[in-house]
Image: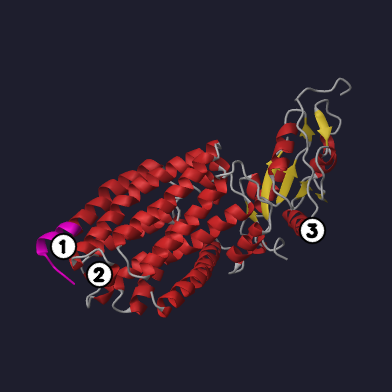
Amino acid sequence: MSLAKSPWIIHVNVNSCNGCDIEVVACLTPLYDAERFGVLNIGTPKQADIMVVTGSVNYKNVNVLKNIYNQIPDPKVVLAVGACASTGGIFHDCYNVIGGVDQIIPVDAYVPGCCPRPEAILDGVVAALSILESKKQGKIKGKEVKLKGNEVPSNA
Amino acid sequence: MNVNDILLAVLVLIGAPIVGCIAAGIDRKITARLQGRVGPPLLQPYYDVRKLLSKDNMIVNKSQNFYVVVYLVFIVLSLLMLIFRQDILMIIFVYTVASVALIVGGMSTGSPYARVGSSREIMAILAYEPILILYALAIYLLTGTFKISAVVDASTPLLAYTPLIFIAMIFVLNIKLKKSPFDYSTSHHAHQELVKGMLTEYSGPGFAIIEIAHFYEYVFLTGLLFVFWTVNPVIGFLLSTAAFLLVIVVDNVTARVYWQWMLKLSWTFLLAISIVNIAFLYFSGVKI
């Protein structure tokens, strides 16, 4: 139970429209107060446990996402917040969009909605806690995701 | 070194982090209540440390965690020297070594955020060190020795002749606990522009040791204020607790300032009131 009592979150915005980001920040306000679960919004990936990703991934920021994922020490979970992070959302057809976050890095929990309510995001964080705990028990390590160049593939 | 001393040392080694942990918990709880939130459980700092110890240790160079251990060892050493009523000047020097170890550790990682945080922490040392030296000088002028045991044995409290230095020491407490308005070297409130400052590149057990050292530091710094009223330990305890609570409230009602502001405040106002106090002690020649 040591991990579930103090989940520290890093919030990564990849190409999000800011709607989900505002809802994520709303979780920290006095009304929802995520800190009562020990949740801290931490700046550096090296001290984070849960990676909250908002927005669909495009060719410009895919390496940033991979880089931040690689820097989080194990055990770690990834939480995709919003329709864009889960599937690509309304941007899934765009020429520059790769798709949901799970195309790039392994995602453990999804919070659907455009944009999701703060209650739903808190629910997603609490769901991620048990996954975090089971990863600790099973000693499951996140695989290192290789960085590539930023070039757009010809078939895109 | 007799059996009692060893027992006291063991008690401090075990008890200080517990007290510091609860103090940090009270800090977070009061902060949450002042912001109209429920806030984390009282033992949240303990849960944080336990979690950090179970995480992977991700380091950028081999010496990084060595500096953290140096920081912990010297903080514990300065606390033990304070408990055993040693030379106040020596305590300040040992304590400075601890602060410098953290700065060198931050500089060694090469992260630009860690460098910015470390250089700001150097400015903080520049700001509070003269006050600490004048505090030691006040003890010397009043007792004729730098030993804290002379203050403890005296029949008059130190505060009776050094009220201005006490005010300056509260500011030192604020700077050293890295509370607002002087929380710019490392603070998780500043994560949007500074990430985590000096401690950006620490993770897992290394960061847990820093947190534990902070617990010792809480006790050590409030202990420096306790020295002001050792005649009656209850009043001394209340005095240091009140100062600590004041720092928490100030943390919540002020915003982060430029480091220049701190340097100006420290080198004009704080230094001036300390020197006035020292001049009074020197010319009146009072002893306790």
x then y, percent, for residue B29: 55, 66
Q: Residue at x 46, y 49 (%)?
A: B101
* In-front residue for pair A22/B118: B118
Q: Quadrant of the C terminus of chain A?
A: top right
Mark 3 residue type: Ala
Residue hosting label 1: B281
x then y, percent, for residue A140: 81, 53
Residue hosting label 2: B158
x then y, percent, for residue A22: 67, 46
Q: Quadrant of residue B80?
A: bottom left
Secondary structure of the residue carrying tag 1 is helix
Chain label for disc 2: B
Please give the range of residues in magenta: B278-288
Q: Quadrant of the N terminus of chain A?
A: bottom right
In-image side of B283 versus A109 (left or right)? left
Q: Residue at x 49, y 57 (%)?
A: B72
**B284 drawn magenta:** yes
Chain label for disc 3: A
Mark 1 residue type: Leu
**B223 drawn magenta:** no
x then y, percent, for residue B270: 28, 53
Q: Which of the marked residues, 2 or 1, is nearer the chain's N terminus?
A: 2
* In-front residue for pair A104/A135: A135
Q: Label 3 neighbourhood size at 10 Å, few (<14), some (14-19), many (20+)?
A: some
In-image side of A36 versus B275 (left or right)? right
Q: Main secondary structure of the magenta part?
A: helix
Residue hosting label 3: A127
Are the numbered discs 2 and 3 placed on the same chain, yes or no?
no
Task: Give the vertical position of B257 relative to B86 (above or below).
Answer: above
